[in-house]
């Protein structure tokens, strides 16, 4: 039985949809409009008349269409879906949406970048926001998460400083959506607690391949507590079913030009295709009595809880299955708040969280124009809402009667508080005592141990990418002292890392490179150990007139049936004709496509097609660039000639004399003299081996990936 709450979010939005009104054009007063292309004038060449109410209303509304963008996380993308628990969590929390696996709780998710403006590119180096609204029967719960598990700072009072330093510099508003400038790195060098998150920010995590392939972390420590008042400290996680995967930096930069909407388009298209993004909800739990049993403070948001030490228990799954109808009404106006919790979930004394509890509602009051933004359809709870709050800008509710106070006798004391036993929210009865001090807990003072563990956990290629990211970012810093201070700061983490950073930015390597004094690692933080699947991956098929139609067809069928998607890329959009006269629709021309938009490339045979491709710089560049980005490349029969003409010559390709022999060389797959490409998904056949190679995500073993091997 589908137990979705009776009023789905969709139902709630219905009365507000313009298509529910009639088809006639009207004014905001509902007056039918007869003409909207010319203003009312005194003579056809005369001045516009003030009394033209339609003109005035249309222009006035337009003039006020923009609201302030979010001060951070301005660029976002939202989708609807539902959440289902795996098992009753009664032992740990009374939260109603975590009890019954048959209940589908509606959700709305907004993914975002943190620093760029609303119109900036998707693929910039940045932390990603991953905010979820659960419209539960006991009120709305917001899990306002990021894709990096730690934060830059300990205490929210430093947030304005951090963001001022990271946003474009105030005198010239440069650079957009980038940390590659002096003020950010000056702040970092002066604030050692940033070291851990900055290392994550320099890692591949900060350039996710897709919002569908990214983890989410609560960062802050919350509390679960059950009906008996027994509590656990918790950190929450989203684990993507497709694994956690990233772009490479060169690709991310090119995508920012080729398709600045790359990540949002990916989610939009995936949902429209039925490839619904899925994330498992995980929880790490620490008993109250174990609060001080770790070598880090569990309330310090610059520290993660190693998954090997405190395992992540998977407690449910979220599926995003519906795109928004209107970006502004839903994605732009949605307001998340870590303070929106439901019975069974509470806060802790994490000082970053405490500050967040103030900031979100405060910023939303100005961004959404007053205290009634909870009445905007996307923000309305599906749980019934009843209180004595009244009036204010944009009030939608028509409260009846004369009673707006409590207690009252005139209305039978309604609305009245709900006792704890009947579901009323109560805070966990934590004992708190202390002197009033403006101080940082000494238990927060170790800034480097977990940074070392993160560095130790990276694979060689991940380490290399981190060093390159430092080179790029610090390459944008003009002040030499700032660069040097960063080198010195990272020498506290790893001497080799600091030396490598220095060597790429013209700074002096540390005189005494620090020796590795922490040998721990956490395999869970390396993306090398993530889930690997080819499902939903996109393949570009390069073809011109004269392509071998049956070959393309066999491979496309095999890829489609394994859940991948193909685009034919050719000189012109329209149709191309295969050798046997059959026609194939082109999806993208060379002008619109780029290898950076795909996970893999396939070149089918057909003499005429391949001869043309070999003359085309675009086609050769496509192959070379995909190879540079460590992507899977496949070619069959004559298609192999395009690879041998390109600069990927280091790769072994099937020779013409080889009899139907599949050659696999570091993610380059070729076969000649083959008629059966295997559209039946069997090992050993080209199609299946091609799919297996795509599932690897990238082929870092290629020689061109290794610029220097960090120790
Ligand atoms: Fe936020 N953050 N933040 N943040 N944050 C906002 O609220 C803030 C922090 C996060 O898609 C703002 O409505 C302070 C951590 C996301 O609409 C603002 C601190 C994490 C989003 C704000 C933090 C986040 C925001 C701006 C303490 C990860 C976008 C607009 C240092 C767990 C939500 C708004 C959306 C948005 C303040 C730190 C995640 C200004 C003071 C840690 C995903 O209120």
Image: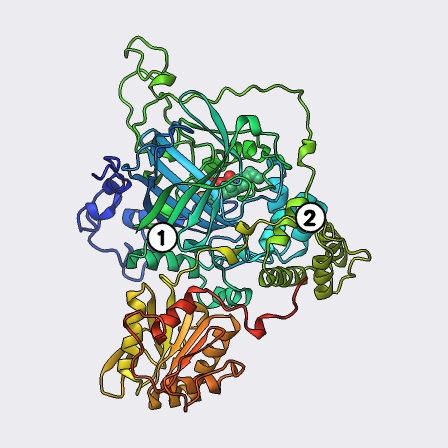
**Residue marked by disc 2:** 518
Q: Quadrant of the N terminus?
A: top left
Give the number of the disc on residue 277. Answer: 1
Question: Under tag 1, what secondary structure?
Answer: loop
The residue located at (35%, 49%) in the rendering is 79
Above or below, comparing residue 617 to residue 132 in the picture: below
Q: In which quarter of the image is the C terminus?
A: bottom right
Measuring from the top left, give residue 319's x and y in whole percent. 33, 47
Residue 347 in sight from this viewpoint: yes
| Mark 2: few/some/many CA within 10 Å (<14, 14-19, 20+) | some
Q: Is residue 16 left or right of residue 360?
A: left
Quadrant of residue 587 within the rendered picture: bottom left
Q: Earlier in the sequence, mark 1 or mark 2?
A: 1
Quadrant of residue 580 within the rendered picture: bottom left
Task: Identify the residue at the far top of this view.
Answer: 409
| Mark 1: few/some/many CA within 10 Å (<14, 14-19, 20+) | many
Measuring from the top left, give residue 607's x and y in whole percent. 34, 90
Nearest the eye: 5 or 580: 580
Quadrant of residue 291 within the rendered picture: top right
Q: In this view, does 141 lie to the left or right of 308?
A: left
């Amino acid at each position: 039985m589908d137990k979705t709450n009776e009023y789905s979010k969709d139902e709630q939005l219905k009365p507000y949809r313009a298509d529910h009104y009639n088809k006639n054009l009207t004014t905001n007063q509902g007056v039918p409009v007869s003409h909207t292309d010319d203003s009312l004038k005194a003579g056809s060449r005369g001045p516009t008349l003030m009394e033209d109410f339609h003109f005035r209303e249309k222009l006035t509304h337009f003039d006020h269409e923009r609201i302030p963008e979010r001060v951070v996380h301005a660029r976002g993308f939202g989708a609807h879906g539902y959440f289902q628990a795996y098992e009753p969590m009664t032992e740990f929390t009374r939260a109603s949406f975590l009890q019954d696996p048959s209940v589908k709780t509606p959700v709305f998710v907004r993914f975002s970048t943190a620093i760029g403006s609303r119109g900036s590119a998707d693929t910039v180096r940045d932390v990603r926001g991953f905010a979820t609204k659960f419209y539960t029967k006991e009120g709305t719960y917001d899990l306002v998460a990021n894709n990096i598990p730690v934060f830059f700072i300990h205490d929210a009072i430093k947030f304005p400083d951090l963001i001022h330093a990271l946003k474009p510099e105030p005198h010239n508003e440069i650079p957009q959506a980038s940390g590659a400038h002096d003020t950010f790195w000056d702040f970092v060098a002066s604030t050692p607690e940033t070291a851990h998150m900055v290392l994550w920010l320099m890692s591949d995590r900060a350039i996710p391949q897709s919002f569908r392939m990214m983890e989410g972390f609560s960062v802050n420590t919350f509390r679960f507590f059950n009906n008996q008042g027994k509590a656990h400290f918790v950190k929450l996680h989203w684990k993507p079913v497709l694994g956690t995967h990233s772009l490479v930096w060169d690709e991310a930069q090119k995508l920012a030009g080729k398709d600045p909407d790359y990540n949002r388009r990916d989610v939009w298209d995936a949902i429209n295709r039925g490839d619904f993004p899925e994330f498992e909800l995980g929880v790490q739990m620490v008993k109250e009595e174990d609060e001080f049993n770790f070598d880090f403070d569990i309330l310090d948001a610059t520290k993660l809880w190693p998954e090997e030490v405190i395992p992540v228990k998977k407690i449910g799954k979220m599926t995003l299955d519906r795109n928004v109808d209107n970006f502004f009404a839903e994605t732009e106006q949605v307001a998340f708040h870590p303070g929106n919790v439901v019975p069974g979930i509470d806060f802790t004394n994490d000082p970053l969280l405490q500050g967040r509890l103030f900031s979100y509602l405060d910023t939303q009051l100005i961004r959404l124009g007053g205290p009634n933004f909870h009445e905007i359809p996307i923000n309305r709870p599906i749980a019934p809402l009843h209180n004595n709050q009244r009036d204010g800008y944009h009030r939608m509710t028509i409260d009846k009667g004369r009673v707006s106070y409590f207690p009252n006798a005139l209305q039978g004391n309604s609305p009245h508080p709900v006792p704890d036993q009947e579901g009323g929210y109560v805070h966990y009865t934590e004992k708190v005592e202390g002197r009033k001090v403006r101080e940082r807990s000494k238990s927060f003072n170790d800034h480097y141990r977990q940074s070392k563990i993160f560095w130790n956990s990276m694979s060689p290629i991940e380490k290399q990418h981190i060093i390159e990211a430092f080179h790029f970012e610090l390459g944008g810093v003009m002040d030499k002292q700032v660069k040097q201070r960063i080198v010195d700061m990272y020498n506290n983490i790893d001497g080799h890392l600091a030396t490598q950073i220095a060597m790429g930015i013209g700074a002096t390597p540390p005189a005494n490179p620090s020796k590795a004094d922490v040998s721990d690692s956490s395999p869970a933080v390396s993306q090398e150990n993530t889930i690997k699947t080819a499902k939903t991956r996109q393949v570009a098929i390069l073809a011109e007139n004269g392509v071998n139609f049956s070959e393309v067809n066999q491979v496309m069928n095999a890829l489609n049936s394994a859940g991948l998607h193909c685009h034919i890329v050719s000189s012109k959009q329209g149709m191309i004709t295969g050798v046997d006269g059959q026609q194939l629709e082109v999806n993208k021309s060379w002008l619109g496509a780029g290898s950076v938009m795909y996970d893999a490339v396939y070149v089918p045979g057909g003499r005429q097609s391949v001869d043309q491709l070999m003359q085309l710089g675009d086609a050769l560049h496509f192959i070379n660039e995909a190879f540079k980005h460590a992507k899977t490349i496949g070619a069959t029969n004559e298609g192999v000639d395009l690879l041998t003409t390109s600069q990927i010559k280091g790769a072994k390709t099937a020779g013409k004399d080889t009899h139907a022999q599949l050659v696999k060389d570091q993610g380059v797959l070729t076969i000649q003299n083959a008629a059966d490409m295997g559209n039946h998904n069997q090992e050993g056949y080209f199609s299946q081996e091609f799919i297996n190679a795509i599932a690897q995500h990238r082929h870092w073993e290629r020689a061109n990936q290794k610029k220097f091997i960090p120790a």
